Image (cartoon, helix red, strand yellow):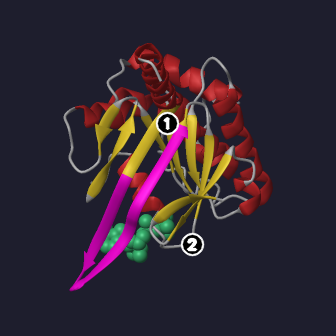
Amino acid sequence: MGVDTWKLHNIGQELNFMTVFRDNLLFAFGLKKSFKIGKNKLDVLKDVEISIKNSELVALMGPSGSGKSTLLNIIGGLLKADDGYVELNNHRYGINNPMYLNDLRRNSIGWIFQNSNLLEHLNIQDNVAFALTLSGFSFKEAQEKALLALDRVGLSDRLGFYPGQLSGGQNQRVAIARAISGNRTLLLADEPTGNLDTGTGEEIIKLFQELCHVPSNSFSVLMVTHDPILASKADRILLLKDGRVVES
Ligand code: ADP
Ligand code: MG
């Protein structure tokens, strides 16, 4: 290879490398996490590597106790890893808590749990708006953004309803609206359909698909599920097993 060809080859390699990074919203490498229980040490994550592309819906499966929630908590910046790092929107964290992690947690990451965890005494628009005011939006901005988010999950005709007046599936849609509102790009969903019947669970996955695949304003979702049928609707299925993540 002559010098010029070599240069071009190197530039090509670099561009490939950059493309990988640009396509990936999230990348985590070498994650390790152990818990001490009395004198025993439980190695939950032994060497986890995971990447999620922009606009990708990824299902994470694995036996109970395999560390799925632990991994989500580390990715969400709520729990420190013992080793390794997470890179989200080109910001790196993992074993320490850099200053920008608060902003990243608040503005880039939305959470959805098995229970929708809505405030019973606020109507659904106020539920979503309240979370936004905690992120620093003004009352007016929060109300507007809540409206947009509830529209995206198909609930714009229920704004004044209270959680008790809606079904479990509708409440989970409100939780999703709360998670996507603002400018968040990554949704972490820990068994979001665990409390729903199969049909309603499928509707929630369909909603995730829509949110991920809208070209102009899309999200990436990392979703823990025990249901192989729901998982099969994702773009990719990952399996957490023996402390490592493998493609299934
Ligand atoms: P999963 O979500 O896959 O069911 P978890 O991530 O919740 O699994 O837990 C993985 C393992 O780590 C379990 O054995 C659990 O008991 C243990 N674990 C999780 N959090 C802690 C903690 N804070 N202290 C001690 N052990 C923990
Ligand atoms: Mg769990």
Question: Which picture quadrant has residue 114?
Answer: bottom right
Q: Which mark is residue 17?
A: none
**At x 22% / y 84%, what residue is drawn?**
38
Q: At numbered mark 2, what does the secondary structure look like: helix, strand or loop?
A: loop
Q: At numbered mark 1, what does the secondary structure look like: helix, strand or loop?
A: strand
Magenta region, mostly helix, strand or loop? Answer: strand
When the figure is inspected, residue 44 is found, relative to residue 57, above or below; the finding is below
Question: Which picture quadrant has residue 137?
Answer: top left
Q: Earlier in the sequence, mark 1 or mark 2?
A: 2
Do labels 1 and 2 touch, CB within 8 Å? no
Q: Nearer the viewer, residue 119 or 152?
A: 152
Residue named by callout 1 = 186
**At x 64% / y 64%, what residue is drawn?**
226
**From the image, which quarter does the C terminus lie in?**
bottom right
Report x, y in % for residue 240. Answer: 53, 64
In the image, is 156 to the left or to the right of 24? right
Residue named by callout 2 = 63
Outermost residue on the right side: it is 199
User: Bounds of the magenta span?
Assistant: 30-52
Outermost residue on the front side: it is 2
Ligand 1: does it lie within 8 Å of the C-beta at label 2?
yes
Amino acid carrying label 1: it is Leu
Report x, y in % for residue 53. Answer: 55, 35
* Residue 138 visible: yes
In the image, is 199 to the left or to the right of 133? right
Indicate yes or no whether the magenta region holds residue 24: no
Report x, y in % for residue 244. Answer: 47, 64
When the figure is inspected, residue 140 is found, relative to residue 113, above or below; the finding is above
